[in-house]
Image: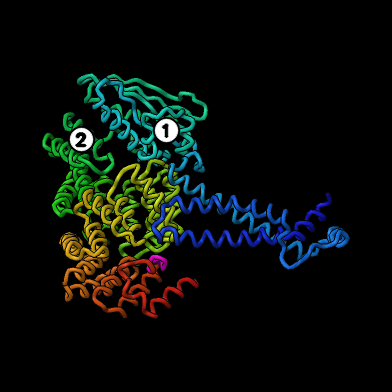
């Protein structure tokens, strides 16, 4: 049959019009369902069902249009008319009409496929094999965890510690491109072949080895492999006493540099200074490092603290052990917000620099300390010193970006994080940090690709899924957000994942469901003021006013403790104002709100909490000014319409105008 005749028959029967109308209607239905389904508290599967039914209904509607001739208001044409139409030349208008219909059909179809694959990916976890590999250089190498050949599994810390020390030595050589520890150590105990590991890490060479320890005697075997060919470029076995471990580390690093660059790096022509003469202290230090590397939670940090303290007791001049203890206390403070940990961190950071002022991690740790205490300019200086000593120390770049952002130097902060990605394209945390920067500066849509990249690099990454869920929620994609948070909880139940899930219920009006989620979060992190405040919100919305006030009071006490350490923390100050407004401190609340606005005039979350505070104080004009500023800075208007804390603004004409104006942007 002539194609023109087919097209004419499709048009005569109204098939093309049905296709266009169905595509537009399906698109509209999807947009409505995306908002209404979460608001009604229906299961996430309902939206998935809508997508599937809409997709399946498309060919059915086309078939019905063909069979029953659904074109309205026109009788069937005579065969002569049909034949005349079939062989008439197609006009440009008609061709444009069919092109537009085809475009709409393809667009809706692509939406279905993309949406279903996205939800499936969030539930199952992303496949890292989809990652585009970074450019591979001839001098690139990854150090895999050394295999412990000792029967005692508790000795695995020693083989990991040895490999990490060698990695650190190689990373300091500017001539080499070394994959980060986080990236390469995730292949521990993996049966993936070297070629695939190298592809994922973006390197050409793999350094692997084994360690056997028998009392004071150790045997270390190391080999450098060209992953593209499988050839062994160098290998050697070392039989030494435990005290010879430092010379083994140095020798392996020098040999790898010689093979890859044909020279010995300047920093390693002379043996480095031995960190301690007390090998028992060094052994304890390695144990402490192993526990410090573990995911936060449980007693890992407490155990690390104990090992570092024992090492220092054996050798009070052991700078690395002091640095480890400093880092441990900073991590404990970041999780618990207890001021005792802050004071201990300050003590051991300064002690580390007294013992050795030329270590990048010590300056980085001190920078973190200044960052937590609100001394942002000093923090910037310490992070810059850390980078000057070791330009590949990525933790210093993350801290530097945070300190610059705290000083409202946003473009410099973003550039710092992008530099970190350029230095180590296979390091997942750099993508997570840049995503978080974009998220907190009101660019949630831009943050999503970076969160996805972090997940692709480390698929079993609860932090990545938790952050991704927050970004989806901020842009109104509630189903994708819920799927991300469920995945995060499945991988590692955390206070933040429970809190985010609770917030999704809270904003959807399911307060009785939100309460247990917030309670789980509080149980996991009882010293986090925001979690107590969230629980107070849910209890108050559920009508449990007295219980809510008690939670707000707990949140207020914790926030005041944080401000003793860092009086310049604008977000804490803004949340404090909100807690004060909810506990009857009506004179203190507006003062705290005003101070927060001065401290961070360009932070959307600060202005959001100022708006909540002003609503509780019935100062609606000031609340409208604050929420308008938050929207200007990137806070999503879609969340404002369902926020119980802003309910008193819903009937205000200025608030409705604000939402209408935001929709037109």
One can see residue 374 in this view: no
Q: Which residue is mark 2?
A: 285
Q: Is residue 373 magenta?
A: no
Q: Quadrant of residue 37?
A: bottom left
Does 428 sit above or below residue 152?
Answer: below
Locate residue 34 relative to residue 389 in the image: left or right: right
Locate residue 80 relative to residue 286 in the image: left or right: right
Residue in the picture at 48% in, 34% down: 204
Query: In 3D space, how far apart are the residues under numbered discs 2 and 1 (Cα atoms)?
Result: 32 Å
Q: Nearer the viewer, residue 170 or 444?
A: 444
One can see residue 79 in this view: yes
Answer yes or no: do the residues labelled 2 and 1 have beta carbons within 8 Å? no
Residue in the picture at 26% in, 29% down: 158
Q: Is residue 637 magenta?
A: yes
Q: Which residue is mark 1?
A: 263
Does 614 sit above or below residue 159?
Answer: below
Q: Residues within 10 Å of mark 1 (few under 14, many from 20)?
A: some
Q: Nearer the viewer, residue 168 or 267?
A: 168
Colour scheme in the image? Answer: rainbow
Q: Which residues are magenta?
A: 634-640
């Amino acid at each position: 049959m002539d194609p023109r005749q087919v097209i004419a028959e499709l048009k005569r029967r109204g098939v093309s019009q049905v296709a266009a109308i169905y595509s537009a209607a399906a698109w509209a239905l999807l947009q409505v369902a995306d908002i209404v389904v979460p608001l009604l508290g229906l299961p996430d599967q309902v939206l998935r069902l809508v997508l599937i039914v809409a997709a399946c209904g498309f060919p059915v509607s086309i078939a019905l249009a063909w069979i029953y001739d659904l074109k309205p208001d026109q009788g069937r044409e005579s065969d002569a008319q049909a034949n005349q139409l079939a062989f008439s030349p197609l006009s440009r208008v008609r061709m444009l009409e069919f092109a537009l219909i085809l475009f709409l059909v393809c667009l809706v179809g692509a939406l279905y496929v993309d949406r279903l694959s996205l939800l499936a990916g969030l539930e199952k976890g992303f496949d890292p094999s989809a990652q585009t590999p970074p450019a591979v250089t001839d001098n690139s190498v990854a150090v895999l965890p050394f295999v412990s050949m000792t029967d005692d599994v508790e000795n695995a810390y020693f083989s990991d510690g040895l490999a990490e020390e060698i990695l650190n030595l190689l990373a300091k050589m500017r001539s080499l491109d070394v994959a980060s520890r986080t990236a390469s150590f995730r292949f521990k105990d993996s049966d993936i072949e070297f070629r695939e590991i190298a592809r994922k890490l973006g390197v050409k060479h793999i350094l692997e080895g084994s360690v056997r320890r028998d009392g004071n005697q150790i045997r270390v075997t190391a080999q450098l492999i060209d992953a593209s060919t499988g050839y062994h470029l160098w290998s050697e076995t070392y039989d030494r006493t435990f005290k010879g471990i430092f010379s083994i580390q140095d020798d392996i690093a020098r040999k790898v540099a010689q093979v890859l660059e044909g020279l010995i790096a300047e920093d390693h022509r002379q043996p480095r200074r031995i960190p301690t003469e007390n090998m028992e202290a060094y052994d304890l230090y390695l144990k402490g490092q192993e526990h410090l590397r573990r995911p936060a939670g449980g007693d890992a940090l407490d155990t690390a603290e104990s090992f570092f303290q024992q090492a220092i007791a054996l050798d009070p001049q052991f700078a690395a052990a002091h640095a480890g203890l400093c880092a441990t206390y900073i991590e404990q403070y970041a999780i618990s917000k207890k001021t005792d940990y802050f004071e201990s961190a300050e003590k051991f950071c300064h002690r580390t620099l007294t013992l050795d002022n030329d270590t990048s991690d010590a300056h980085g740790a001190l920078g973190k300390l200044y960052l937590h205490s609100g001394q942002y300019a000093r923090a910037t200086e310490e992070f810059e010193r850390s980078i000057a000593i070791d330009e590949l120390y990525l933790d210093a770049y993350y801290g530097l970006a945070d300190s610059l952002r705290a000083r409202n130097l946003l473009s410099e902060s973003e550039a710092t994080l992008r530099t970190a990605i350029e230095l180590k394209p296979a390091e997942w945390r750099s993508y997570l940090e840049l995503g978080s920067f974009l998220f907190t500066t009101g660019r949630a849509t831009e943050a999503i690709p970076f969160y996805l990249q972090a997940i692709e690099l480390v698929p079993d990454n609860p932090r990545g899924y938790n952050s991704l869920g927050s970004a989806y929620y901020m842009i109104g994609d509630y189903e994708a957000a819920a799927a991300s948070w469920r995945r995060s909880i499945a991988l590692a139940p955390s206070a933040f994942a429970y809190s985010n899930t609770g917030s999704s219920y809270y904003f959807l009006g399911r307060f009785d469901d939100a309460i247990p989620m917030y309670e789980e979060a509080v149980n996991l992190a009882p010293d986090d003021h925001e979690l107590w405040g969230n629980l107070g919100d849910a209890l108050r919305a559920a009508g449990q006013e007295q219980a809510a006030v008690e939670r707000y009071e707990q949140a207020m006490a914790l926030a005041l403790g944080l401000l003793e350490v860092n009086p310049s923390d604008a977000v804490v100050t803004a949340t404090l104002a909100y807690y004060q407004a909810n506990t009857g401190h009506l004179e203190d609340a507006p003062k705290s709100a005003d101070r927060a606005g001065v401290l961070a005039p360009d932070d959307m979350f600060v202005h959001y909490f100022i708006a909540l505070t002003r609503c509780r104080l019935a100062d609606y004009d000031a609340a409208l000014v604050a929420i308008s500023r938050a929207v200007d800075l990137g806070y999503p208007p879609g969340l404002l319409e369902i926020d119980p804390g802003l309910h008193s603004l819903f009937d205000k004409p200025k608030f409705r105008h604000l939402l209408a104006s935001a929709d037109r942007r």
